Image (cartoon, rainbow, N blue to C red):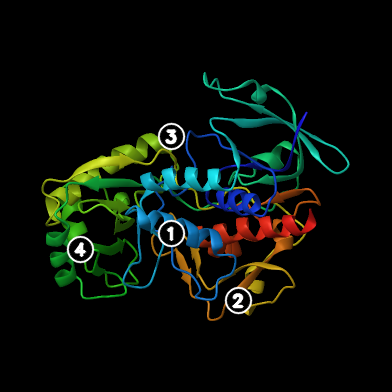
Amino acid sequence: MKKYDIVIAGGGTAGCACAYIAGKLGLNVLLVERNSFLGGSITSSLVIPAMKTSENAINTEFFEKLYSELSAIGGAITYCDGNKGWFNPELTKIVLDKLMQEAHVDILFESNITKIEQKLSSYIVTIEDNNNPLSSGILLHPIETSYLVDATGDAKICQKLNCEFLEKKSQPVNLRFIMSGIDIKKFSNWIMDFDKDRNVTTSCVVNGNTYLSTAYTWDTGANWALKPVFKQAIDDGVITESESNYFQLFSVAGTPDSIAFNCPRLINNTKNPYIEGRFSILRLSNFCKKYLPGFENAYISSIANSIGIRVSNRIKGRYVYTADDLRSGKKFDTPVVISNYPIDVHSAQKDSSTLEKVYQEYQLPIESLMVNDNLFVIGRCISADFEAQAALRIIPSCFSMGEGLAKYLSRKS
């Protein structure tokens, strides 16, 4: 029977960080990914850019390495606010492959862990290959691992092991997309003149290309510059009122004519969010072409493969991290994350979303990643209450969780 030090289920942001650092520290690592590529939210769900967090963040070696490798091939920039998290999702797939090879991480693509048996100090996992014709015989054989890491986002491994979960709450999901063929300079000049609020709309030139960001929501508490534009589009029947609930866009690193959209935010509790989302994307793209200068010749160039999920299952681990811990800046003996990102809770109701600033840095302890001595969770399914998880789910924090866990397991091994 083949044996690994660590088997990681899920090759998303947290899983890749954990695999890379563990491999670089000399551990024998197997990464099991259901898709044909790595990156999770960045690549499959088009969650770009990564949000900016504390200048005093810890466990950032993987983030810095990913940025360095992507930057070298034109796939990452540092934005004018100092955020290095502006990644190109397609090039991220390639760089993650390279990093896993560099760290000697074994990867099984298009695969799932279907059976788990617990021994005294290890797990025996059986892996299914999702009918991949290129698979090898190893996929049908049990594999033993000293440590099992659930980085699936939905805590699918913990579900199979009948672990205890925290109360389930939800936030609306997004189905993101990218448009290309945009005259970015034209749009930048227009939006920067149209919206003078630099907390909402910004633009800068990096490596000769113009990059920008802007936003709008239907909430009435802010004086959104784009409000009359959306009202006109609703009156014209181009989009529905519900499709104006959340609109955010960012340029894409290394592409002179593309913009990524953090929308539509799906609020109608449909049975099939992918169908609703794609119809909304078509209407939003028509809105952009009709009302936003620079989009006249634009087209939809990419739609996310996966829904962007903000919260789902959360495990009850050794320590349940709370919003009170976060707000108070409680200190811990073994922190894996240091951040100051706000509590960010999206709502399907108008004027009901929360973006609560945090006025000091906070720490996430290793115990919030522990289910038992051999089973761990990283990513959005960590042991944290609803509000705390809403601050910790961002990409840089997930990178830090994965890296921090890898270092912890290296010390234990």
Amino acid type, label 3: Asn
Depth check, mark 3 against mark 4: the one in front is 4
Q: Residue at x 76, y 59 (%)?
A: 411
Query: How far apart are the two marked residues, 4 and 2, measured between alpha carbons?
Result: 41 Å
Amino acid type, label 2: Arg
* Residue that label 3 marks: 272
Left or right side of 319 for 11: left
* Residue that label 4 marks: 208
* Residue that label 1 marks: 67
Q: Which of the two labelled residues, at mark 1 and mark 2, occupies the earlier sequence position?
A: 1
Numbered mark located on residue 327 in the image: 2
Amino acid type, label 4: Gly
Depth check, mark 3 against mark 2: the one in front is 2
Q: Residue furthest right?
A: 120
Left or right side of 294 for 213: right
Image coordinates for residue 129, horizontal then vertical, percent? 59, 25
Instruction: Please report contact status of discs 4 and 2: CB closer than 8 Å, yes or no.
Output: no
Few, some or many residues within 10 Å of mark 2 (<14, 14–19, 20+): some
Residue 40 is at least partly visible in this image: no
